[in-house]
Amino acid sequence: MQGARTPGSMSPGLRRVMDRARRNPHERQFALAYLIDVDALGRSYHRLRKDSAVGVDGVTKEQYGQNLEENLQDLHVRLKTMKYRHQPIRRVHIPKDRNRRRPIGISTTEDKIVQGALREILEVIYEQDFLDCSHGFRPGRRPHDALRVLNQVVRRAEANVILEGDIVSFFDSIDRPMLMEMLQERIADKSFMRLIGKCLHVGVLDGEEFSEPEEGTVQGSALSPILGNIYLHNVLDRWFELEVKPRLKGKATLIRFADDFVICFEHRQDAERVKTVLGKRLGRYRLSLQPDKTRLVEFRRPPWSQTR
């Protein structure tokens, strides 16, 4: 996971966007597409893993880099003139557990570069908006941060009941029109939005079978993690912090890592109320909970922790 970006490590343009987003949390950002210049594409290229899997064109990072400057210049021209086309994604299936396999989409090297440049801009905007309850796929944050928060909540005796949430096929279920509406609340640059749309509406090649999914984001895309975070920031995080918590009798803490989350409650009555409305809330955004994996768990602190 990449480390947190500091203002000193950013380009002047990114720094200006970050400052505007921080000062004006309700303001829409203009003039973003121009930030995807040759330098931004180069940064994205160098962030790619050396052993990154190849897409449908079979071009590796090393092969693309043999004429890097020429390739990036050509890509930049096609982006500026709106002639860039995202190629189909190659789908492979990797083991998820003993009985199931998980589909992963692999983009071409060039498409990964574009995705990374878009993500860089989205991050400097949305890192000013995301709440502390969100820990997954964010610069400078790790799984241990989520565990540390959970440990603190337990020690404060605010986790007597824990609601474990499991969203069914989250990335495949994201409603694209709703996601684009969420993005438009912060982004006013039509060229930038059009480019995100090109990265969302792509064909998938699974063996010899070609399809064009109408919903979801492809797991494996460099954009999927931040787009997923933006979606759940609006669907779950803000709703819980601004609408749910003020109505509860006791304390409650949401801890989310990508699409996995738990909510710790001081009182069982609060936990039962939230569990009842949570499914309806997610359903408004085309998401659903896995019934056999979404449950309330009674938590009893070990005796040693009660004396500290």
Image (cartoon, helix red, strand yellow):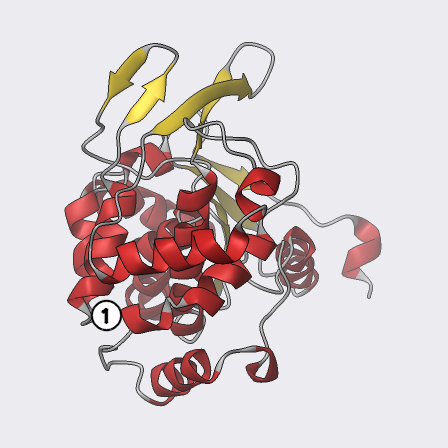
Residue 266 in view here: no
Residue drawn at x 46%, y 85% is 12
Q: How many marks?
A: 1
Residue 169 in view here: yes
Residue drawn at x 32%, y 35% is 87
Residue drawn at x 44%, y 56% is 72
**Above/below status of 49 relative to 96:** below
Relative to 307, is 267 on the left or the right? left
**Front residue of 14 and 290:** 14
Residue drawn at x 32%, y 62% is 244
- Which residue sits furthest bottom? 23
**Above/below status of 247 relative to 294:** below
Quarter of the view holding residue 6: bottom right
Name the residue that disc number 1 marks. Answer: 187
Assign a secondary structure to mark 1: loop
- Location of the C terminus by quadrant is bottom right
Relative to 39, is 240 on the left or the right? left
User: Could you say where residue 295 lies in the image, as x and y percent from the top left?
Assistant: 45, 34
User: Could you say where residue 169 lies in the image, as x and y percent from the top left?
Assistant: 37, 30
User: Could you say where residue 249 lies in the image, as x and y percent from the top left?
Assistant: 39, 65
Quarter of the view holding residue 291: top left
Q: Amino acid at mark 1?
A: Ile
Residue neighbourhood size for the residue with mark 1, other residues' Cα within 10 Å, grouped as few (<14), some (14–19), many (≥20): many
User: Could you say where residue 26 lies in the image, as x and y percent from the top left?
Assistant: 25, 80
